[in-house]
Amino acid sequence: NLQSGGPVKFLCQNAAKQSFNHFCVIRLGSGFAIVQHKFLVASFVKAGCLKRHLNILAREAEECSLFSEKRKKKARVDHTASSMERNFITPVRAMSDFLLKPVDLEGLRKTKRRSPYENEPPITVFWRKDVEAKAIEVWGSRETLLKELIIRDAKRKNYQQNIFSVKKRLREYRREGMKEDRHEAGLFGSSGKVVLTAIAIFQHKSNFLFKLLAWLYTGSHTMFSESIHSLADTINQLILAYGIHKSVQHPDPDHPYGYSNMKYVASLISGVGIFCVGTGLSFYHGVMGLVNPAPMEPLFWAFFILGGSLVSEGATLLVAVNSIKKGAKENMMSFTEYVLRGQDPSVNVVLMEDLAAVIGVGVASVCMGLAAHFGSPVPDAVGSLLIGGILGGVASFLIYTNVAALVGKSISQERLDRINSELEADVMIRAIHDVKGIDIGNSLVRYKAELDFDGRELTRSYLDKQDLSFITRVREVNNMKNIDELEAFLLKHGENIVDMMGAEIDRIEMKLRKNHPEIRHCDLEIL
């Protein structure tokens, strides 16, 4: 009996090797603990050595007993099982899915969780199992609750069939609540002003009507091509105006990412219209002029009308060029790169149409002049074919650039590198992978990246934000009586660290949007 609370028995083996395996059986309360300890025979020579070793064995046995007697059998995590034991539910869903009232939720357990929406405070959530139990208590049984849900769902569907007037009022309210910056991005923005200017000039000068009258008077195939060109331009400007107006509308449930691609759709329709109407009719009349040449009337008025068209279309071209220069400077791109990448499709359409119009006026003047000089309709028919070729080239360029944008076009590599460098410089991130930056229209970007988080920095940041006293935490750990209490301690802080990871992602996204306002959607995923 050496301060161990009970008898001690030694079993010695391997005596020939002067090494012993000792099995110490120590009484602890109503039970026994068995520990094994090995040491040399020479250690017995010293006074008190045996007693010290027995004390060590007693302490080892006591610690082993404390963490083994009361520990429950640990259940493994089954990833294939379906469970809602620890799921949360918002108050809105609790009232809609379980037909509860706010007063029914007052006594239930609740907690604060990080909001899934940016720049929003934490949301209040309840334990789903508590809400289900309360719903059964209120409605009497699960079957009664399901019947009531079916009845209310039928009423809701019946109500939705008669809400046309409500939708109309909501639509009017949204229009009235439009902010000034959304107006600036719409028809009153830079690209919208270019289109409105183009429409106004075409309306006031009536290029199409004058050219049509000149064709009817002179019979010139080149003049016919120019009149068709002006008609196509006017219709295209109206299509672009609709596309710009539609592109700034608010996202809705059917289009959660908004309508920003409508500018590309409208520009694509314009390109197809130019190709089909402008190129097709110009080639047709040019070929007919070569196959069936006809004498032409004096071309004086035709030259006069071409001069007026050159002034009006040149003015619109100048407005488009200035708008593109401004946009290229804001995006730190060259003029050519800005046009080729189709950063502003509406302005690009106006630019290419008016550039083709100015070149077409020059071609028409030369061909009509040759026809008048030689008295032959052949140069005039060739002029119609040349104008058709110019329109076909412009249409092909517009179709190609807008199709590329609608399919999903990456932003420039320099721009993407700037965003990546800023993201990698964050202290919480060790590496980024699978990075994508997509232009979604209206100079907006959708950015996506896979993040390799630094677990040490995340944990250190969590500890910095906790009111952790070293002495307090040491006492808390030392006061644990079994392994289950230690596991609960680790689970608590582990869950908090996961919540903090979500908060860190929100912080990083907010930082990126602040430094890069063009990022509309930021998808950051954890590896």
Image: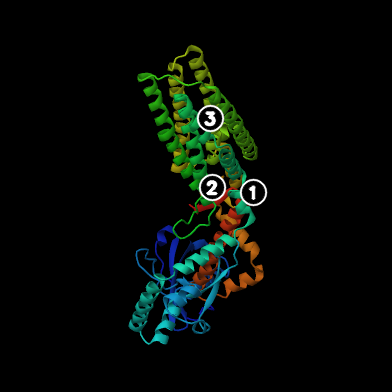
Residue 253: x and y, percent?
46, 60
For discs 1 and 2, the disc positioned in front in the rendered view: 2
How packed is label 1: few (under 14 Cα within 10 Å), some, or many (20 or more)?
Answer: few
Residue type at mark 2: give it.
Ile
Residue type at mark 1: give it.
Asn
Q: What secondary structure is marked by label 3?
A: helix
Residue lying at 50% horizontally and 16% vertically, measured from the top left: 372
Q: Which residue is mark 1?
A: 515
Question: Is disc 3 in contact with disc 1, using a CB cutoff of under 8 Å?
Answer: no
Position of 485 relative to 168 (above/below): below
Q: What secondary structure is marked by label 1?
A: helix
Residue 394: x and y, percent?
48, 31
Q: Quadrant of residue 80?
A: bottom left
Residue 102: x and y, percent?
51, 81
Residue lying at 40% horizontally and 20% vertically, measured from the top left: 294
- Nearest to N terminus: mark 3 or mark 1: 3
Q: Which residue is mark 3?
A: 357
Q: CA distance from mark 3 to mark 2?
A: 23 Å
Q: What secondary structure is marked by label 2?
A: helix
Q: Describe residue 466's horizontal placement relative to residue 450 as left or right.
A: right
Q: Which residue is mark 2?
A: 244
Residue 87: x and y, percent?
45, 71
Q: Describe residue 153's horizontal placement relative to residue 373 as left or right.
A: left
Can residue 274 be seen here? The reply is: yes
